[in-house]
Amino acid sequence: MDTGQIGVWHPAIGKAPAAVARRAAVEIEKLGYASVWVNEGPGSRDPFVAASLLLSATSRVAVGTGIANLWGRDATAMAASRATLGEAFPGRFLLGIGVSHSTLVGSRGHSYGKPLTAMREYLDGMDQAQPGLLEGDAPRLLAALRPKMLELSRDRAAGAHTYFVPPEHTALAREVLGHDRLLVPEQAVLLETDPARARQIARTHMAYYLTLPNYVNNLLALGYTDDDLADGGSDRLADAIVAWGDPESVVKRVRAHLDAGADHVALQPLSPSVPDLTDALTQLRTLAPTLSL
């Protein structure tokens, strides 16, 4: 990510037909964005297969997993994937690992248990597997929100990839991580200047995440109230989670994350109902000049 501070995170990149996803990554690279992030969720490709498709189609842009679910593969397999892509695409792959959420983990047949312990033991397994693998390296980032997982990101990884967070969380995360670890927050964005419509789209985006305790507890710790989280989210919360308005307003929020200590910000363009890659690319084209990519 030495080429820039702004990247792209979009769920459709991991779900679109391969040819569509490759074309999107090529355009994102040409526009000047420095990274593309692929998630692992219901209906998405295996993130390492998706990452390899995008890396093979591009020449400069970095590709990260945001995130690869540790319950989806054992630690040796995760370490091997990291080494394989790190060796094949030097300096262009970032491994984001996360513990996911109890409902999603349960649907895989696992018990969520103690996520911090699970992550710590998983990292032990990855480190034990590393000596016998290809000499390929890639930054290892942890999906982290609360202080203890951020501390683990500092002590056992290259940094943290955060999601569904306002800039005040970025400031707190930087304080925990110190100055020598990567911090990559995701930021939902929307080029919509009508407040009522923008907040309606923001609430559609937030609805699922406000059912997940990890995100809810993090917001409460940041000072948001039960009233902020009720009925799809308050205006205050919608405005904090989604940067909406004209390009200058969106860029102001991106700058707020960078000023708070982010090394890189991954933009997630929102669409009115469901994630729409075509609409996302349109917004990214419009934003690129104001971002000075």
Image (cartoon, rainbow, N blue to C red):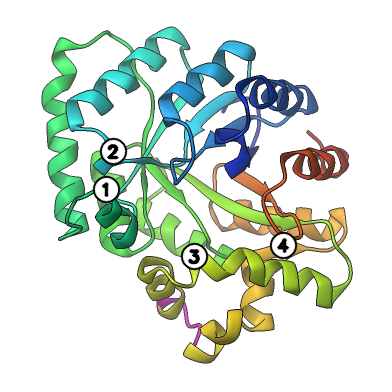
Quarter of the image with the C terminus is top right
Left/right of residue 167 with respect to residue 114 in the rendered view: right
Separation (CA) of disc 4 from disc 3: 15 Å
Tag in front: 1 or 2: 1
Q: Residue 227: x, y in percent?
A: 54, 91
Total number of numbered discs in the rendering: 4
Residue that mark 2 sits on: 72
Give the CA distance from mark 1 to mark 3: 30 Å
Q: Mark on residue 243?
A: 4
The percent position of residue 53, horizontal first and vertical second, equals 54, 17
Distance Cα–Cα, label 2 vs label 3: 28 Å
Give the CA distance from mark 4 to mark 1: 33 Å
Q: Nearer the viewer, mark 4 or mark 1?
A: 1
Q: Mark 4 and mark 3 in contact? Answer it, CB < 8 Å.
A: no
Magenta region:
221-225
CB atoms at circles 1 and 2 under 8 Å apart? yes
Q: Is residue 7 magenta?
A: no
Q: Which residue is mark 1?
A: 108
Q: Secondary structure at mark 2?
A: helix
| Marker disc for residue 169 | 3
